Amino acid sequence: MASPIISFQDYGFQYRAQAEPTLRHINLDIYPGEKVLIAGTSGSGKSTVGNCINGLIPFAYPGESTGRLMVDGTEAKQSSIFELSHIVGTVLQDTDGQFIGLTVGEDIAFAAENDCVPQDEMKQLVDKVAKLVDIDHHLEYAPHELSGGQKQRVSLAGVMIEEVKVLLFDEPLANLDPAAGRATIELIDMVHKRTGAAVLIIEHRLEDVLWRHMDRIVLMNEGEIIADLPTQKLLAGEPLMQHGIRDPLYLTALRYAGVEISEAIHPEHVDSLVLSEADKEKVRNWYQMQKASIHSRQQGEELLRVEDLKFGYTPDQDTLQDVSFVVHKGEMVSIVGRNGAGKSTLAKLICGFEQPASGRISMEGRDLKGDTIKERAERIGYVMQNPNQMISKPMIWDEVEMALLQSDMPKEERSKRVEETLKVCGLYPFRNWPISALSFGQKKRVTIASILVKRPQIIILDEPTAGQDYHHYTEIMDFLKELNEKGYTILMITHDMHLMLEYTQRAIVFSEGRMLADTTAAHVLNDPDLVKAANLKETSLYTLSQSCGIEEPQVFTECFISYEQKEVR
């Protein structure tokens, strides 16, 4: 049998700034050509494992290690980041922290440039990998001009340009629309087959990763490995949700219907399921028992109106055109669509960060054109997609409290508000930590907390749950739901279709700067034409309902969400 390319031997690690070890007794072997998913909640240690493999630990993030870590036969701590980079190619969770070049083309070429590849050959390599990740039309763009999903593709291309033995992806789906996320998993699968490299994916979006075969899943909790099993065996065991990881939706639905999840039904993907007629009958019977009319929420007074909005970052190109919709008080609305569709640009226009070329944005009937950004911020809170673009204080408490310092709020009340918000966002235990010690997902929660602490009328969140495990995802979304039930109006830009279905009745769909639809959330994912146009994807509930002979997949989806809200929460 081949020797492992990566071998953790009773390995432990403690960051210099931490009082307790982050990793404990890690024993893990990864063999050449394997595809392995490392899953776990935020703070479980999964990203730390990745940082050990690529050399960021201990060379960039110092600390004390115990045991041994071997990478391609060499002890990692005796090597260097540069040497390890020729063995391990890494796509970081925070893509902005990985860019080197002034343009996309330069960034992709960086590794080849370091290896002194001749220029003509280098250009061919850049063109080849850029086409593979569908970024070849953006080679002259600066990285900061790209959407989150486009940045992810550039990082992928930068890894693919150099032959490595290990490909490490740290939450590769965090900023991608559903179809782009599926394409990314397909791309990783293709690269794996073409190169034969070992592939490690660190991700908690289990169902999305399992769009393509994974050899095994390593489940982590509190710095330890609690399971290391083939995919089928792990999915057939105890529900992953007990460990903070959401089960694939189709498996959750089958459990609700009383279907036994075993290795025999091939549970690793909805398309691979082998269900008996008796199992399908259980699903149909459950559906009939749950089926009920979906009651629409009573519409409140008009709060925000967008009329004939048009905007472009350059005079000759429209990023948004002919956008019109109305948001009522107390609504919770999802804004969905492909990467680069204009969703984040719309939020910037509403908040006043950009000014429209034409059209009107009004709030409670009053045109906002003359309001400053600060004046709008008193009524409209905006949580950006990238937390690094929002954070300005070194300590967590100070960052969250900062928004209240200019107010007349008494210190005692201010502290109470900050404490309450930190608890809801899962940050209270870290309240005295420096932000530099946080993971990307934890930084995201800090930025959400810094906006929520002000309690604005409208809260706009750009990918509020990106990088969040199920526990923190649910905690944040339930808090937003509570705010919504108290009358706060919430707009969410999201690629998470379950979030859209579970928490919002209404969805506004964008593609290429135009608004394609303003309809119910369940309808969005049960309209194949709309799904294709907006670069979304049907949920596995849609596929499951069809395979069980249910003719109303939209109603089946609504029944599933309703059941979860009433019976499970």
Image (cartoon, rainbow, N blue to C red):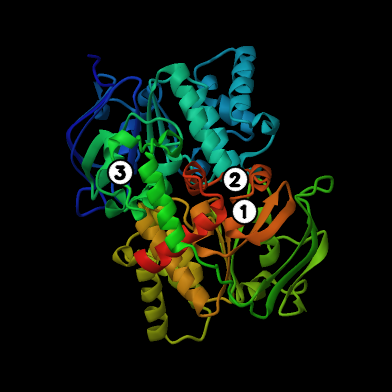
Tag 1: amino acid: Val
Q: Which residue is drawn at the image coordinates 40% and 57% (left, top)?
A: 286
Numbered label tally: 3
Disc 3 on helix, strand or loop? loop
The residue labelled by disc 1 is 524
Residue 351, image x and y in percent? 66, 66
Residue 430 sits in quarter: bottom left
Residue 54, image x and y in percent? 35, 31
Tag 2: amino acid: Leu
Disc 1 on helix, strand or loop? helix
The answer to whether the residues at label 1 and label 2 have Cβ atoms under 8 Å apart is: yes
Residue 365, image x and y in percent? 75, 79
Figure quadrant of the C terminus: bottom left
Choose mark 1 or mark 2, whichever is in front: 1
Disc 2 on helix, strand or loop? loop
The residue labelled by disc 2 is 536
Work out whether residue 476 can be spotted. Answer: no
Tag 3: amino acid: Ile
The answer to whether the residues at label 3 and label 1 have Cβ atoms under 8 Å apart is: no
The residue labelled by disc 3 is 261
